[in-house]
Image (tube, grey):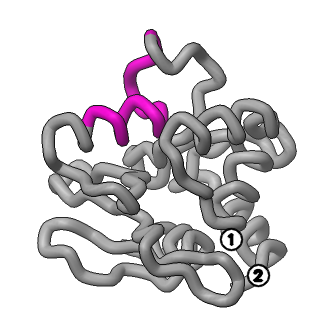
Amino acid sequence: MDYKKVVDLIDANRGKVDFGAFGSGVDDIWIEKAQKRLRVRFPPSFVWWLKNYGGGAIDGDEIFSVYEMDFDSVVGGDIVYINELYQEKGFATPGELFIQKSDFGEDYYIDLNQIDDRAESPIYVAPPGVKYAEDFLHFLEKKINEQ
C-alpha cells in the first residue's frame, strides 16, 4: 500500500473516516517534541499521517495523535498523554506505542522494538497480543475496510 492509495481510500470512505482535511496536520516541531518526550522515533508512515491529517477517527475510534498542547496539561487522545498513562499503569512497556483503543476494548500499538528496512514497525492488537498489520498504512487500510 502506498500513500496515494491511502489518500484515495480515506477520501472514498469519508462517512466512516473522520480525519482532518489532507494537509492540515501536526507541525514538525510538535512531532519532534512528542518523540523526544516519549523517547521514541515514530515510523515514517505514522509521521506522514500526523503531518497530513493531524488526527481523527475510524468508525468513531480515535487514533491517538499529537494535540499540539503542553504535554503536562493535555488529556484525551493525545499520544503522549495516553502512552505515559499506559506506562505508568503498567499497561505498556517501552517500545510499545499505543495508537488506538476500540469500543470493543482492543488496544492497538506499534511495536517499535521491531523495525524493518523502511524504518516501519508492525501494529499489534491486545488482547490477545497478535500482529494486526505490517505497518501503519496497512493498519489504516485494514481498519477502513473492516465491516
Q: Where, quadrant-wise, is the C terminus in this rendering?
A: bottom left
Q: In this view, does 97 lie to the left or right of 86?
A: right
Considering depth in this image, is 147 or 103 the residue closer to the camera? 103
Q: Residue 2 carries which label?
A: 2
Question: Circle 1 is placed at which residue position?
Answer: 9
Measuring from the top left, give residue 63's x and y in whole percent.
47, 48
Q: Which residue shows up at 44% across the image and 10% down it? A: 73
Measuring from the top left, give residue 140's x and y in whole percent.
55, 68
Is residue 13 visible in the rendered image? The answer is no
Q: Which mark is residue 93?
A: none
Tell which circle, 2 or 1, labels the residue nearer the N-terminal end.
2
Q: Which residue shows up at 50% across the image and 72% down it? A: 139
Considering depth in this image, is 131 or 53 the residue closer to the camera? 131
The kind of residue on which mark 2 rests is: Asp
- Bounds of the magenta span? 73-85
Considering depth in this image, is 32 or 82 the residue closer to the camera? 32
| Residue 26, picture quadrant | top right
122 lies above or below 26? below
Is residue 66 visible in the rendered image? The answer is yes
Q: In this view, does 115 lie to the left or right of 51?
A: left
Q: Using a 10 Å C-alpha cutoff, classify the residue at mark 1 as few (fewer than 14 neighbours), some (14 to 19) or many (20 or more).
A: some
Q: Using a 10 Å C-alpha cutoff, classify the residue at mark 2 as few (fewer than 14 neighbours), some (14 to 19) or many (20 or more).
A: few
